[in-house]
Image: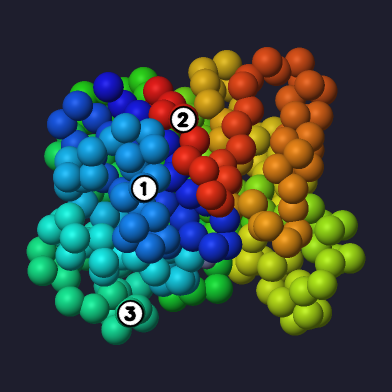
Amino acid sequence: MFQTAVLASGSKGNCTVIRTENTKILLDAGLSGKRISQALKSIHLNENKIQALVVSHEHNDHIKGAGIICRKLKIPLYITELTYLACKRKLGFLPEGFLFFEQGKSFQIGDLIISPFSASHDVVEGCNFIFRKAGDSERKLAIATDLGFSTKLLLTKLTNATTIILESNHDLKMLLEGSYPSQLKQRVRSRQGHLSNEQAAGVISQVIHPGLKNLILAHLSEQNNKPELAKKTMGDFLKEINCKLDLFISLQNKATKIFNI
Ligand SMILES: [Zn+2]
Ligand SMILES: [Zn+2]
């Protein structure tokens, strides 16, 4: 077993679960402890089996419930040192402690091998991740959200992934015509902001391969995007290249199904 499900995704909170037979972890906890519990229950996962929380960066939509969930489930937190320093007051007391990981250095939790790499985002040390199961060279999960633009590093990391969870944050037209103040529009569009629907399609165009089983679009803006628009932009591209890949959208208030990576 090597599976993932997005419990919630969007600017109001992000949380993803990754599991094997022996290891169950959460990536990010940007929801209240209660919402995380409810989301896990909604897909019939036992929260008491979760063994660790990994955090990608210090924005509130990724850490809001981090301290609470570490205390409630009595699990350790995996975080980079700079990110920890940037949000330690918000995390509060961590009874099981924390472990530092470094970008570019893989680490292991149970039989999950986790490779964090740098994402261009307006934080101290934004991370995207590759997850593998020890002893399984075929399956590979890539999770890339909260990034302003696609880099060579990102494309290299996404190569041969069998499941990709990729940011498709905004529709550029909706963002430009929307109600965000111009400074915030600028921030979202910047190289340290978020990927648009078109940029997400651009990324996939460069890494698509016959072994890609699941593509899940994530971190959709509620203000500047619509699930149908994100799906259409990526769907049109996939149609163009005659790719029959199943496309999924992760949402703010509903967990996805459980995907076999
Ligand atoms: Zn975010
Ligand atoms: Zn962020």
Dot 1 surroundings within 10 Å: few (below 14), some, or many (20 or more)? some
* Residue type, label 3: Lys
Horizontal placement of 6 versus 232: left or right?
left
Q: Secondary structure at mark 1?
A: helix
Q: Locate residue 249: give its quadrant.
A: top right
Q: Single out the mark in the foreground, 3 or 2.
A: 2
* Residue 20 image position (x, y, % from top left): 24, 30
Which residue carries the number 1 mark?
A: 38
Q: Secondary structure at mark 3?
A: helix
188 vs 248, nearest the viewer: 248
Q: Residue at coordinates 69% horizontally, 68% vertically from top-left?
A: 188
Mark 2–mark 1 contact, CB under 8 Å? no
* Residue 28 appears in the figure: no
Identify the mark at residue 252; answer none if there is no mark. Answer: none
Cα gap from disc 1 to disc 3, whole angstroms? 22 Å
* Residue type, label 1: Gln
Which residue carries the number 2 mark?
A: 257
Which comes before the other along the chain, label 1 or label 3?
1
Mark 1–mark 3 contact, CB under 8 Å? no
Dot 3 surroundings within 10 Å: few (below 14), some, or many (20 or more)? some
Q: Secondary structure at mark 2?
A: loop
Answer yes or no: disc 2 within 8 Å of ligand 1: no
Which residue carries the number 3 mark?
A: 90
Q: Single out the mark in the foreground, 2 or 1.
A: 1
